[in-house]
Image (spheres, coloured by chain):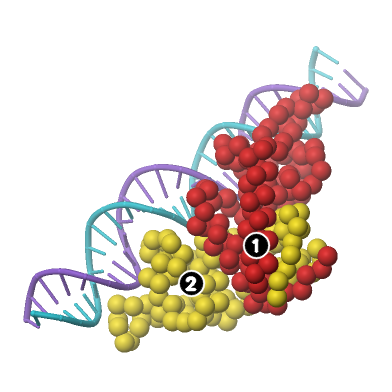
Chain colours: A yellow, B red, C purple, D cyan
Amino acid sequence: MSVALTTAEALTLWHDVAFALVRDDEPDLSVRQVCILLTIYLEAPPHTVRDLAKKLAVTKPVITRALDTMGKLELVSRRRDDKDRRNVLIQRTVKGALYLERLADTIGKHAKSL
Amino acid sequence: MSVALTTAEALTLWHDVAFALVRDDEPDLSVRQVCILLTIYLEAPPHTVRDLAKKLAVTKPVITRALDTMGKLELVSRRRDDKDRRNVLIQRTVKGALYLERLADTIGKHAKSL
DNA sequence: CCAGACTGTAACGGCTCCGAAACAACCATG
DNA sequence: CATGGTTGTTTCGGAGCCGTTACAGTCTGG
């Protein structure tokens, strides 16, 4: 699928979704955090801190802290890798999946009404 | 125009754009700030602090501070209203227009390659 | 078995943001 | 004019995120 958007359409879409996120009750995630969350849910597992840091071109502590916060929100969970106990495997959660489904809904709804 | 997106498409689009924003050299704007900036550029002037606060359902200091930061980045400028000197009129700038044009490009590019 | 390389994490300092409340400048109505 | 209501801003305390650096646990190859 290929979608052509005018400048105004693209900006209106972005505005509407950002607006929905701000008005939402959910605590605001930073752009970085959303990016991390989406990477976890869109790309195939397994995900480690190192891999995510490399993919997003940020330092490892950024990933650790983002996992801390999103872990508290139960959008994501962590587990030690039994094969190599240095590794931490990042896993999806039901809440995280629902959160992103709602986000996709919001985006889709506003794209449809452009 | 009406654009239908699957869940995966919507999330991929959001991820790609967020990723581009994170990797960008520009200082990251928060979701709130982008929302304010887009409101200023998409809706018809004049814009006042009070109006923006009401539209986005945030307190006035949030707007003031966002204007401070974005003002430093020259994405937006302020001027006293001569008709009513209590008011501050928020104005667009060349840099701000260019910033949003680039954002629209990024969105459009990734929408096209869905 | 142990030195070195690799994991993820904690600690530090700096910056930004937030909401509530207090504030200063300004208008308008009597 | 004075007073009450309007505007935007500042201040305060608290919280979050960031990058750098330093750390603790784990593997691995000689």
Letter of the chain that mark 1 sits on in the rendering: B
| Residue at position x 58%, y 52% in the image | B30
Q: Position of residue B105 (x, y in %)?
A: 66, 56
- Please indicate, yes or no, whether residue A12 appears anywhere in the rendered image: no
User: Which quarter of the figure has residue B45?
Assistant: top right
Image quarter for residue C29? top right
> Label 1 amino acid?
Lys
Secondary structure category for the residue under label 2: helix
> Which disc number belongs to residue B109?
1
Q: What's the amino acid at mark 2?
A: Gly
Q: Quadrant of the C terminus of chain A?
A: bottom right
Say yes or no: labels 2 and 1 on the same chain.
no
Q: Residues within 10 Å of mark 1 (few under 14, many from 20)?
A: some
Q: Disc 2, disc 1: CB below 8 Å?
A: no
Q: Is B103 located above or below residue A107 in the figure?
A: above
Which residue appears at 76% of the width and 25% of the height? B85
User: Does any portion of residue A46 appear in the rendered image?
Assistant: yes
Quadrant for the N terminus of chain A, please.
Answer: bottom right
Rendering coords of residue B89 (x, y %): 74, 33
Residue B40 placement, left or right of A33: right
* Residue D5 placement, left or right of B79: right
Q: Nearer the viewer, residue B52 or B94?
A: B94
Q: Which mark is residue B99?
A: none
Q: Which residue is mark 2?
A: A71
Marks 2, 1: nearer the viewer? 1
Residue A88, compared with residue B14, is above or below; it is: below
User: What secondary structure is found at the residue carrying circle 1?
Assistant: helix
| Residue B2 versus residue B55 in the image, above or below | below
Residue at image coords 63%, 47%: B99
Name the subunit of mark 2.
Answer: A
Q: Nearer the viewer, residue A101 or C4?
A: C4
